[in-house]
Image (cartoon, rainbow, N blue to C red):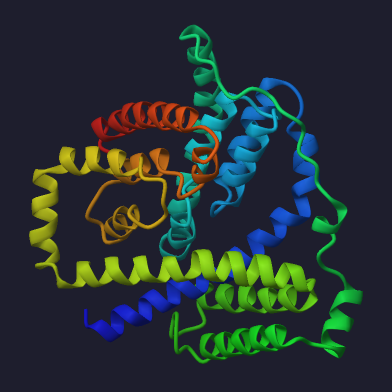
């Protein structure tokens, strides 16, 4: 694979990731008030909803889980379960490369989050682990939820700001190259159609959103904090893989050291950052590693969803990571033993 081909594939994946992130961010903002209310209740409800939030692509669900934990809406077990279900920004890349298997993985992580969330609470009680004390409940302000509307769209079209014009030009440019097949599939398959639809939807959301939403959420958060990083890691990993020896040689080496790869997937998952785990996504997409290794990597890692908790409680962060590593290696080891 030459450098231009690698660049084209990395750009395609990044555009797909960006357009999906804009849509998921909008869903997160629109549902924030309802999620806050729904998370109050019995323990099983905490496990289900925190795992659901974690299994949504990206870091937004993980951030919400941390916020709920710090505000006393969910317990330690639910936080562990939510982080188990979280796959970070890699989830978007998996959806672009192998959507069917990615959905199976997300489903397995969602169920694991519920099960091991309950086990974590039981173990925490048994081990007399003192976790973050409850503080005041999180407040969701109405102006944070009402970020889109027809009136806003009309106003934005009548009096567009420089930032909105730049965003519109960017989205139109991406739409054009996606429609023409400059990036993505050359034929009108599911991926090309999905990419065009998501870009069109992202354009509408950006144009109908408030100035705060456009500046802080789409430009500041999705584009600057995530999309650039996803592109750099994706391009870097693809470039490294393209310069490795033949696939047969690499696969033979990996097969001879699979347990080392397996353990590395778990240990690298401790890193509270999206990116380093991309190597396992790409190796799985290339058929170099089995599902069990990707499962361990996704199970233990949580992108940078843990960073907000690290700033508040290093002790709780280490406990969550320790639980996830042990559980992930155990379940992944069983899957690997069965040849999965």
Q: x, y percentage for residue 97?
A: 41, 64
Whether 76 is drawn above or below 3: the answer is above
Residue 162 in the image, given as x and y percentages of width and height = 71, 88
Q: Nearer the viewer, residue 330 or 79?
A: 79
x, y (%) of residue 287? Answer: 25, 57
Q: Provide residue 94's location: percent of width, then percent of height.
A: 43, 58
Residue found 46% across the figure and 84% down from its top: 187
Which quadrant holds residue 135?
A: top right
Residue furthest toward the right?
151
Quadrant of the image containing the C terminus: top left
Image side of residue 55 versus residue 256, left or right: right
Q: Is residue 172 above or below residue 230?
A: below
Q: Is residue 340 left or right of residue 88?
A: left
Q: Residue at x 62, y 77 (%)?
A: 199
How many numbered circles are shown?
A: 0
Question: In the figure, residue 221 lies in which quadrant?
Answer: bottom right
Q: Nearer the viewer, residue 120 or 102?
A: 120
Quadrant that contains the N terminus: bottom left
From this view, report whether residue 318 is shown above or below residue 19.
Answer: above
């Amino acid at each position: 694979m030459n450098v231009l081909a690698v660049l084209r594939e990395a750009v395609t994946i990044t555009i797909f990731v960006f357009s999906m992130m804009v849509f998921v961010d909008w869903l997160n903002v629109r549902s924030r008030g309802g999620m806050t209310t729904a998370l109050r209740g019995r323990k099983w409800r905490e496990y289900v909803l925190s795992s659901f939030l974690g299994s949504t692509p990206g870091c937004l669900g993980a951030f919400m889980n941390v916020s709920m934990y710090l505000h006393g809406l969910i317990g330690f077990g639910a936080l562990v379960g939510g982080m188990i279900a979280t796959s970070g920004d890699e989830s978007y890349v998996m959806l672009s490369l192998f959507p069917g298997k990615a959905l199976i993985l997300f489903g397995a992580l969602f169920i694991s989050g519920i099960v091991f969330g309950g086990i974590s609470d039981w173990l925490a009680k048994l081990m007399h682990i003192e976790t973050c004390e409850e503080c005041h409940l999180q407040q969701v302000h109405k102006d944070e939820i009402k970020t889109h509307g027809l009136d806003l769209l009309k106003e934005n079209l009548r009096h567009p700001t420089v930032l909105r014009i730049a965003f519109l030009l960017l989205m139109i440019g991406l739409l054009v190259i996606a429609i023409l097949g400059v990036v993505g599939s050359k034929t009108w398959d599911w991926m090309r159609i999905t990419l065009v639809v998501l870009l069109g939807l992202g354009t509408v959301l950006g144009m109908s959103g408030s100035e705060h939403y456009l500046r802080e959420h789409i430009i500041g958060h999705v584009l600057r904090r995530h999309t650039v990083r996803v592109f750099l890691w994706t391009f870097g990993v693809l470039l490294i893989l393209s310069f490795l020896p033949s696939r047969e040689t690499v696969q033979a080496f990996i097969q001879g050291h699979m347990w080392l790869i397996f353990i590395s997937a778990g240990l690298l998952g401790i890193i509270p950052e999206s990116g380093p785990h991309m190597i396992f996504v790409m190796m799985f997409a290339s058929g170099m590693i089995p599902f069990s290794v990707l499962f361990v990597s996704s199970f233990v890692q949580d992108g940078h969803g843990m960073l907000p908790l690290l700033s508040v409680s290093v002790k709780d962060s280490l406990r969550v990571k320790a639980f996830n590593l042990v559980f992930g290696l155990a379940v992944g080891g069983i899957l690997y033993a069965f040849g999965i």
